[in-house]
Image (cartoon, rainbow, N blue to C red):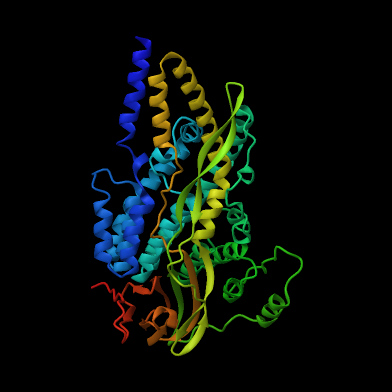
Amino acid sequence: MASRALTSIALCAVTLLTGCSAFRSYDNELEQTNQQLRAGNLDAALSLLEKHNLGEDKDLLYYFEKGELLRAKGDLNGSQAAWSQADQVVGNWEDSVKFDTDKYLAQFGSFLINDKVRRYEGYDYEKVMLTTQMAMNLLASNDFDGARMAIKKTHEREAVIAELRDKEYLKREDEAEKQGIKMEYKDLKGYPVEALDAPDVVNLKNSYQSAFSHYLAGFVYEALGEKDLAAPGYRKAAELRPNTPLLEQALLNLDNPAAPVKANSKRKSAKSKRQKAAKTSALPALAADESDVLIVVQSGLAPARDSVRIPLPLPINGNLVITPLSFPVIKADTSTQTFTQIGIDGQQQNLTLLNSTTAMSRRALRDDMPGIILRTSVRAITRGITQKNLNEVNPLAGLAVGLASAVTEGADTRTWRTLPDNTQVARLRLKQGEHNLSLPNALGGTQVQVKVDQRYQVIALRVVGNQVFSSGLASRVIPNNAGQHMANNQQP
């Protein structure tokens, strides 16, 4: 009887798993969607997203992706509505963390559940970039007060994440010592360690604080006349990306300049010294017919996550057993050519990189790998012991558990794929009126007509492949002579 019961339980487990997210290839789904996005077929991209999310209970990723696709289409209201749904999900996550952090960590740190069958909660950088992108939607309509509220939420969210990660680190250290798991990602033979140890990854303070988010906060506060709040925003941005002239100049231009930001290194390059020497005074006040314009160019797509198998020796019933285990890796998107300048009325202006989603994603994985290794190893050891014991009682039950393990084994490959990769900015003073922006020849030399009519204004462009999208009332993409598809998206 006992053996038949074990067999039934094991077979039921296999049956249940066939209907769960363990079989969903999110990377493949979004690659199809992104192909349509790169071709400029936004309606087709949205149709594919809906096709892959037919159930009534939509998950966080659905709202992430839908909001970004609608934003590229120019439907800012629809985009904001989708992202508001996502923000509510993230808000519920915040409440669960703040209400009982220990309970949340115990549930999330469970060794019994594979990461890819958990309900998706979003990576820390995605949660923070959500409210940043929502602020960008509002700024496209010159709603600085609304953007201020989104920015305030961003700062509050960062504080929740910081406190949670500190507690998670301590708990993980205790669990690793208790379980006797001392392996690090650098011990995984055949794993692309160099990608997680790259300078642009290691130099990040953490995976969720973005220099762009904080610089945007400074710009919004400055536009609203709250310079005492603008200074901390600019200062934090400069702390996250040291020796960046754009960030240092922003501090200098405030009426009450902040103390100069100290460099991380005592030794500065000659170029950095020349840049410092060139900035001896703040810019004069805006003239009556001038505007302070922040041009934001978001290009590329967030990287994909893939799963690789690494054989590890694990102690099972007193023996070291070589067991293939799956771990996530980051695959950068290369569909959009990088560029560092944009033309303004025929004059080339340098763009300053303030955010790389690829670097943030790799930093998130770098920080998560100890927990992933711990959970995966303990689960594999437990599974191995269970299967051995079942084999001794009923080989069929052991076989069923083995089949279930093979089916569910794999790293979690879900991530917000339509999120822009690089965010670059240029800030300049323009006479109020119409201006012409031009992108590099690699992007078809796309021309964008811009109307500047606010004292402080944000102009946003989205570049994917060779497609250029704009949204809001202030900008319009001009189709080029080659007939290349470009999106002219304006709200009515």
Side (left or right) of 114 relative to 195 = left
Please state the total of marks drawn on the protein image: 0
**What residue is drawn where x is 32% and y is 19%?**
8
Q: Residue 370, located in which quarter of the rendered image?
A: top right
Horizontal and vertical percent for residue 429? 48, 83
Horizontal and vertical percent for residue 389? 48, 17
**What residue is drawn where x is 51% and y is 50%?**
329
Side (left or right) of 205 relative to 218 = right
> Could you tell me which quadrant the C terminus lies in?
bottom left
Q: Taking 168 as reference, is 45 above or below it?
A: below
Q: Quick one: 158 or 226, which is closer to the camera?
A: 158
Residue furthest out toward the top: 1
**What residue is drawn where x is 46% and y is 50%?**
306
Q: Quick one: 343 or 181, which is closer to the camera?
A: 181
**What residue is drawn where x is 24% and y is 58%?**
47
Q: Quick one: 302 or 275, which is closer to the camera?
A: 302
Horizontal and vertical percent for residue 230? 53, 66
Residue furthest out toward the front: 395
Horizontal and vertical percent for residue 64? 36, 54
> Could you tell me which quadrant the N terminus lies in?
top left
Q: Taking 431 as reference, is 471 above or below it?
A: above
Q: Taking 208 as reference, is 471 above or below it?
A: below
Q: Is residue 71 visible?
A: no
Residue furthest out toward the right: 266
Q: Is residue 436 visible?
A: yes
